[in-house]
Image: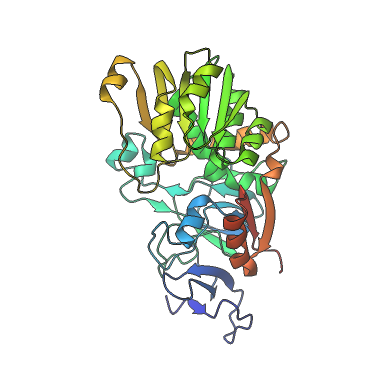
Amino acid sequence: MESAIHSVGFSDNIIDIVMSDPCVSIILTGEEPALQRTEVKRPQLQPGEVLVEILCCTICGSDLHTYDGTRSTPCPTILGHEMVGRVVDLHPEYPTVDFLNRPVKIGDRITWSVAVACQKCEYCRRGLTQKCTSLFKYGHQKLTDKNYLSGGLASHCHLVKGTTIFKVPASLPDQIASPANCATATVMAAFRLAGDIQDRSVLILGAGMLGITATAVAQTKGAASVIVTDIDPQRVQRGLEFGATHSILVKKDEPLHSEVLHLTQGRGVDIVFDMTGVPEVIESGLETLDIGGTMILVGSVYPARPLQVSAEQIVRRLLKIEGIHNYVDLDLANALNFLERYQHTYPFQKLCDQSFSLEEVLQAFEASGEHRSYRVAVLPQQKS
């Protein structure tokens, strides 16, 4: 990568090597210093590739966990996968189209699927493209000399051939649209797995970004009741703002299932979405299911102890437990449609309450961790 990249100290604003039309990235090094400001050459595009100027990158929980060492990733890398950008370069001899087969042009405001699949392997043929055997994931890739702009904490992102592109609706602000290609699309995938929820009772465990988005989605899909739970009173209140019919502030040593049974006249709920990944929460959630109920596991994306589950109860009560990881392209299309339609019905504009320039990435991570913000935005084109 030495031919393409010139690195300087993160706090150093003076570049001693002059490049023509450089791009800037913040690299997670895997050593000290953890973050490094880097200037890179503007890539020469191959057929099917696109260069995007990043307008907004929101910091996801997985970015924060990778930065603080809770989650491992190959380094060096550029974090950030929730992105909105503007097309600044296309290969002149290769027509590029979006998910709806519309031509993509320079100047278009777009987002794109976080995962790029081969569409040929066994998993792709089964519709599990997020588990492609040769998967490429933006914001997760180890940098190479061929692709050194693969994350959102940069001035530009280099889209590889095969990336599914989506034009962002003009009415949708960057900071509302940015989480679509992770949080919102993942929620849409979870509801696709759950099936028809019309007139059914729903319990959502955890009122973070996934949980409150799921709360709004459940309400718009006609759920009879939507119960949201969290240990944080402010997040429980936010769940009510996003359409919950009931909320439960979870307290230590107070069983969740008794409160849920009280709210459901002793029957329990039809569907549970777990967004926490916490074994104790999942086990408690299983106890709230009515006969024939379904639990969708969404938040279990980090190591935890094995679940203590009664197989007999699953069999006798006809329960289903399913997991969803990431999403397929259709889920992102549905996410953008949902946000465009309901951005004013629910207070999505309140979820991203702070923004920082690319030079202020350290402050952005600190704000994301310390203040338990739903989302913090990095605006690479904004000057600090």
Residue at 33% in and 16% down: 318
Which residue is at the front of the view, 43 or 48?
43
Name the side, left or right, on which 298 lies relative to 358: left
Which residue is at the front of the view, 252 or 134?
252
Residue at 55% in and 68% down: 25
Q: In the rendered image, which quarter contains the N terminus?
A: bottom left
Which residue is at the front of the view, 304 or 222?
304
> Furthest-bottom residue in view?
16
Q: In the rendered image, which quarter contains the C terminus?
A: bottom right
Residue at 32% in and 34% down: 126
Q: With respect to residue 258, does 21 lie above or below?
A: below
Q: Position of residue 160 (x, y in %)?
A: 46, 56
Q: Position of residue 24 (x, y in %)?
A: 58, 70
Q: How are the residues colored?
A: rainbow
Give the quarter of the image for residue 284: top left
Which residue is at the front of the view, 379 or 246?
246
Q: Position of residue 38 (x, y in %)?
A: 54, 74
| Residue 197 visible in the shown view | no
Q: Position of residue 349 (x, y in %)?
A: 71, 43
Q: With respect to residue 231, does 89 lie above or below?
A: below
Query: How many callouts does the rendering have?
Result: 0
| Residue 78 visible in the shown view | yes
Q: With respect to residue 67, does 105 lie above or below?
A: above
